[in-house]
Image (cartoon, helix red, strand yellow):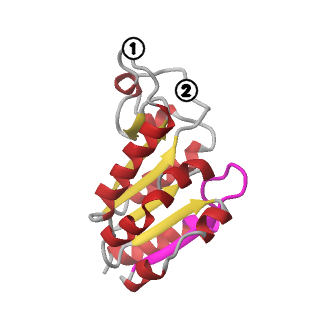
């Protein structure tokens, strides 16, 4: 089983660049890194980190490689374009899709291609979306649910990327699916 988590970088970082992206970011990013680790105990878990500085990086990539050279920031439009492509590419194969984004990035990425993501979604997959209430209310989950998908949502309040209850529901759903 494949799980894919999409989230944004954190402003809080470690001092050392020579470590995986997942370990470089600190603060509340730790919630997502911990979730990725917990999912990795159950399934093959992949963390995708979005940043206007470098676009989309894998959680396993070393920051020293991500920041190699004198690259210029990619900017929000290129980051969003990369994220939309990666979301679409992973949706068809993912047994678990976790998308935890701020309002602006959610709008630029997920909302822009929602119908395509739903069409590409693997039947009976698990989708967990953490975003502002207004963003979640703008999405139609019926077609996803018609494919037998489990849909969990977390209405993001403040900086918390996922709530404790939603996290536990997600892990339980993944455990059930992994043991089927």
- Position of the C terminus, as image quadrant, is bottom left
Could you say which quadrant of the image residue 18 lies in?
Answer: top left
Above or below, 136 relative to 71: below
Q: Is 158 covered by the magenta stretch?
A: yes
Closest to the observer: 80 or 169? 80
Q: Is 92 covered by the magenta stretch?
A: no
Residue 25, percent across and down?
Answer: 53, 35
Counting residues from the start of the chain, the first of labels 2 and 1 encountered is 2
Residue 130, percent across and down?
Answer: 57, 60
Q: Secondary structure at mark 1?
A: loop
Q: Residue at x 41, y 63 (%)?
A: 97
Above or below, 24 relative to 105: above
**Does residue 33 appear in the picture of this structure?**
no
Q: Residue furthest right?
A: 158
Closest to the observer: 103 or 169? 103
Closest to the observer: 96 or 168? 96
* Relative horizontal placement of residue 76, taking residue 163 as reference (left or right): left
Above or below, 49 relative to 16: below
Residue 12, percent across and down?
Answer: 61, 32
Q: Residue at x 38, y 65 (%)?
A: 117
Could you say which quadrant of the image residue 100 lies in?
Answer: bottom right
Residue at the disc numbered 1: 70
Residue 150, percent across and down?
Answer: 45, 78
Q: How many marks?
A: 2
Distance CA(mark 2)–CA(mark 1) = 20 Å
Q: Give the residues in magenta.
A: 149-167
Q: Nearer the viewer, mark 2 or mark 1?
A: 1
Residue at the disc numbered 2: 14
Q: Residue at x 40, y 22 (%)?
A: 67
Instruction: Rate crowding at label 2 as few (under 14), some (14 to 19) or many (20 or more) other CA atoms within 10 Å.
Output: few
- Position of the N terminus, as image quadrant, is bottom left
């Amino acid at each position: 089983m494949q799980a894919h988590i999409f989230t944004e970088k954190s402003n809080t970082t470690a001092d050392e660049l020579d470590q995986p992206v997942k370990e470089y970011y600190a603060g509340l990013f730790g919630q997502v890194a911990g979730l990725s680790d917990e999912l990795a105990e159950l399934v093959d878990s992949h963390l995708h980190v979005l940043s206007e500085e470098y676009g989309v990086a894998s959680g396993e990539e070393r920051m020293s490689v991500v920041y190699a050279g004198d690259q210029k920031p990619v900017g929000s439009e290129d980051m969003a374009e990369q994220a939309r492509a990666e979301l679409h590419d992973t949706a068809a194969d993912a047994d678990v899709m976790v998308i935890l984004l701020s309002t602006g990035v959610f709008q630029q990425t997920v909302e822009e291609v929602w119908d395509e993501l739903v069409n590409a979604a693997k039947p009976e997959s698990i989708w967990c979306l953490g975003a502002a209430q207004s963003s979640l209310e703008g999405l139609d989950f019926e077609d996803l649910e018609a494919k037998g998908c489990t849909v969990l949502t977390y209405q993001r309040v403040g900086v918390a990327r996922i709530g404790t209850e939603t996290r536990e529901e997600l892990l339980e759903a993944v455990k059930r699916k992994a043991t089927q």
